[in-house]
Image (tube, coloured by chain):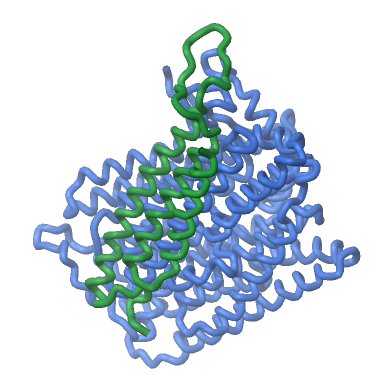
Chain colours: A blue, B green
Amino acid sequence: MTVGPEHLIIAPIVVPFLAGALTLIYDERQRRAKLGIGLVSCAITLLAAVELLVRSKGSDLTGGNDIGFYLLGDWAAPYGIVLVVDRLSAMMLVLTGLLALPALVFAAAGPHRQGQHFHAMFQFLLMGLNGAFLTGDLFNLFVFFEVLLAASYGLLLHGGGVAKVRAGLHYIAINLTASLLFLIGVSLVYGVTGTLNMAQLVQLVPVLTEAQRPLFHAGAAIMAVAFLVKAGVWPLAFWLPAAYAAGAAPVAAVFAVMTKVGVYVLVRLSLLIFGAQAGASAGFGAELLVAGGLLTVTFGLFGTLAAREMDRVAAYLVMVSSGTVIAATGIVAGGGPVGVLSAAFFYMIGSTLAVSAAFLLVEPMRRLGGEAELITDTVADDYDDPDDDPRPEVVLALPGTVTILGLAFTVSMMASAGLPPLSGFIGKLGMVQGLLDLASVDGWAWGFIAVLFLSGFATLVATLRIGIRTFWGTETTEPPRILALEFAPILFLVALLAVLAVKADVTLGYMVDTTDALLQPTIYAEGVLGAPRAEEGGP
Amino acid sequence: MEIILSAAIGVLAASGTWLILRPRTFQVIIGLCLLSYAVNLFIFSMGRVMLGVPPIMPRGGFVDPTAYADPLPQALVLTAIVISFATTALFLVVMIASRGLTGTDHVDGAER
């Protein structure tokens, strides 16, 4: 067997897995080697994701849509587990890769020295994330959820301390319970339909008997509760601000995409299984998604206003971002204007990058405010010893340090709040355009529009307050010590935000096609079930 | 048979739910264990409740599928057991760390 281009689909799972296992071999003192392996793995994964994204755009022949399949173990589709990469999965893979790389570089500035096995857990988290985006099987999705959750438990506790252990205890307890709910939902769905393959579900749901349907709906709803917990939707998200604020900066920066896994699965399943072709089940739960999403945004809005610290504000911004996308999903799943969802995808990419940058900014800004010294100096490093490789001492002593930090802060917050000319504005504008069409038919779309504007306003007020206090309200005579390794990732994310806004026509066009593809679940289903096995002589 | 199994699942799930809502970490972890037992039994029961029949069919020829147990839930339950066992063990470590750091076994790390 030769490793041909068709095996690229599994690369985003296998590469971090091997890299994570490899870093375990190295001793804790050889952090440089571990870091090198991690960076190489992240880079390969990102390149693979970009290639998959290019491929998923397909050619004119395929209508600009190409869905890739990978049959694990070469078992035919409904019996074995299948990996599927379409436009949505590829987009999420690229987003994960783009967040992982800067977070890892930032970790090299210090945070990865505060405990054991940071790099291994980081790679396993990436493996779980990528697997969850790729899989086309419900139980396999559960397994990848557990992989990413197990890694996230370790990462959240990385560094130790009372705050982390306390937040971690709540985080683990709630996620264990959510996983159990996920299992109940999966087994109910299996009990009713006899399959766990998402593509086969698409075909089976319209032909369910009236006696089976309520049980299937119950299973789907219980499963959805688990995803809503992960996405951080309002009544299920009180764990989120404490956990995200307690995590180390690079950890929180990657966690920004972890809530998006919940959002991704909700988008995928509600449009795939409960799409227009689903007969009596079409649009199941759509109103609840809209209501839950809007309540989440409202809660996040008050949270940002109430929060006094940057890390809390960023944690509430995570909720605002995922709530907005979930509400938009509900609108489209309920048969609303399609443009809302493509704009919401665009908003999601921008806001995730912005929130990630905000988490990375927490630590440098705290140092600027003179509140804490470099965290590696204050935390006793038990694993440090004289033989350790010297600490990277590339300090930027530019007088412009404060200016650059301030600009990065401003850009990321403008993108979150939705001010022109950045990506948040374009995304929100698109959503409002779609909602205005809906508002003439359905009065309460005005509520969504109001919440969108209010959340932007609240973000602006909250971040302005923090910005003024940090950048203008402090009287530091000398610029703070900020490592180049900390600057680079922040600037990278800010640059990505700028690119996203400048290239908005290309990216938004991609999102529009993504949404169109999502609304035709039969193509996905027939593709998966007809995927040729290698033995039978595939392409 | 069905009554006994569903009653067992119900009692386990109910006790587990009550325990995870309690304020002590020890109660929470026992509650999670009970809940995961309930869920494992539940998954198992989703592939028809049958006694003394093999899950693997013989090779070739026509076989009557109703004379065999469904192998898939059994495989799923194995995976679920392994995963919930591992995560519960991890949770136990965090619990002990929390007890050591805060000096209390309250889930919030402090008596009210």
Residue at horizontal 34 percent and vertical 82 percent from the top: B111
Q: Quadrant of residue A280?
A: top right
- Examine the rendered structure and indicate whether residue A332 appears above or below residue B49: below
Say which residue appears at 51% left-offset and 40% top-offset: A139
Residue A204 at least partly seen: yes
- Residue name at image x 54 percent, y 76 percent: A410
| Residue A480, horizontal then vertical, whole percent | 33, 80
Is A446 rendered above or below residue A536? below
Query: In what quadrant of the picture does the C terminus of chain A appear?
Result: top right
- Residue B76: x and y in percent read 46, 37
- Is A100 displayed left or right of B109 in the figure? right
- Compared to residue B41, the image places residue A529 above or below, namely above
Query: Residue A226, image x and y in percent?
Result: 54, 55
Residue A490 in the image: state x and y as whole percent: 45, 65
Residue A46 in sight here: no
Q: Nearer the viewer, residue B100 or A440?
A: B100
